[in-house]
Image: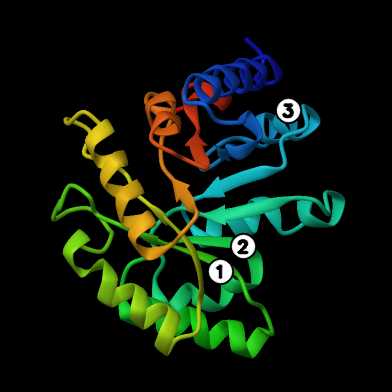
């Protein structure tokens, strides 16, 4: 299928999943994960009307989107991959939302760059719901203190939480945990769910889903 057809299929699925959960489909945003995609596929998605994209790496995103921003002023870019403090300047300049705050050093660097650049970007905290050593994200038990640091000491606009469940575990429990922690903090936004599990995420309250393969097809090696 074409990317336009893929997008229609995903939006139809979002509508059905939202209805089953007693929610409005408009409450769920589709973040098309465009990392490592060739220009032709990016242009096809843009032509089909997609304007919200997620990128994992700052440098790759700069190369892909810096010039396209001039052509598509309604473009929205989310950073959904780990951020290094030495890339905070570029990230703050390029992205509209940063979803992966997970360390005090990163929070400070982002806050400093926002002040320098006069930007006030919405931010999410990434939670490592599976406590996986190899994965980014704050430990669930440390979330309250980290939120207080980000909001209270750094003055960041924390709007939601983000997670990537372990690949070998059912995702529903992880989505439910993230939703509970967001409620406890009074946060309205939940970035969770990918190509294989976003219907489950919507049932648990996802407000944005991050879909790569479902939009663009399998990546070329």
Please name the residue shown 44% across and 39% down the image: 205
| The quarter of the displayed image where residue 70 is located | bottom right
Cα distance between the residues tagged 2 and 3: 21 Å
Cα distance between the residues tagged 1 and 3: 25 Å
Which numbered circle lies on residue 44?
Answer: 3
> Neighbour class for label 1 at 10 Å: few (<14), some, many (≥20)?
many
Secondary element under disc 2, as helix, strand or loop, is: loop
Height in image: 59 above or below 20? below
Please name the residue shown 49% across and 79% down the image: 110
Secondary element under disc 1, as helix, strand or loop, is: helix
Residue 60 pos. (x, y %): 55, 54
Q: Is residue 146 left or right of residue 22?
A: left
Q: Is residue 177 left or right of residue 100?
A: left
Q: Are marks 1 and 2 in contact (CB under 8 Å)?
A: yes
> Neighbour class for label 2 at 10 Å: few (<14), some, many (≥20)?
many
Please name the residue shown 60% across and 88% down the image: 115
> Neighbour class for label 3 at 10 Å: few (<14), some, many (≥20)?
some
Cα distance between the residues tagged 1 and 2: 6 Å
Q: Is residue 220 left or right of residue 184?
A: right
Q: Please tell me which residue lies in front, 153 or 2.
A: 153
Residue 19 pos. (x, y %): 55, 21
Please name the residue shown 35% across and 73% down the image: 147
> Disc 2 marks which residue?
95
> Disc 1 marks which residue?
91
Q: Are marks 2 and 3 in contact (CB under 8 Å)?
A: no
State the scheme by which the image is colored.
Answer: rainbow
């Amino acid at each position: 299928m074409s990317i336009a057809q893929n997008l229609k299929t995903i939006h139809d699925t979002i509508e059905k999943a939202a209805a089953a959960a007693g929610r409005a489909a408009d409450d769920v945003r589709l973040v098309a994960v465009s990392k490592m995609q060739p220009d032709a596929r990016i242009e096809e998605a843009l032509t089909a009307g997609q304007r919200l994209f997620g990128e994992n790496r700052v440098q790759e995103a700069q190369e892909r989107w810096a010039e396209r921003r001039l052509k598509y002023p309604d473009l929205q870019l989310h950073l959904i991959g780990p951020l290094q403090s030495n890339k905070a300047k570029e990230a703050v300049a390029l992205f509209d939302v940063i979803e992966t705050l997970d360390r005090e050093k990163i929070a400070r660097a982002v806050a400093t760059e926002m002040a320098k650049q006069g930007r006030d970007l919405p931010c999410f905290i990434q939670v490592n719901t599976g406590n996986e050593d190899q994965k980014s994200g704050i430990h669930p038990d440390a979330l309250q203190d980290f939120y207080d640091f980000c909001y209270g000491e750094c003055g960041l606009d924390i709007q939601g939480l983000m997670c990537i469940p372990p690949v070998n575990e059912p995702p529903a429990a992880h989505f439910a945990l993230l939703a509970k922690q967001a409620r406890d903090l009074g946060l309205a936004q939940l970035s969770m769910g990918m190509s294989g599990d976003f219907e489950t995420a919507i049932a648990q309250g996802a407000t944005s889903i991050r879909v790569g393969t479902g939009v663009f097809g399998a990546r070329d090696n």
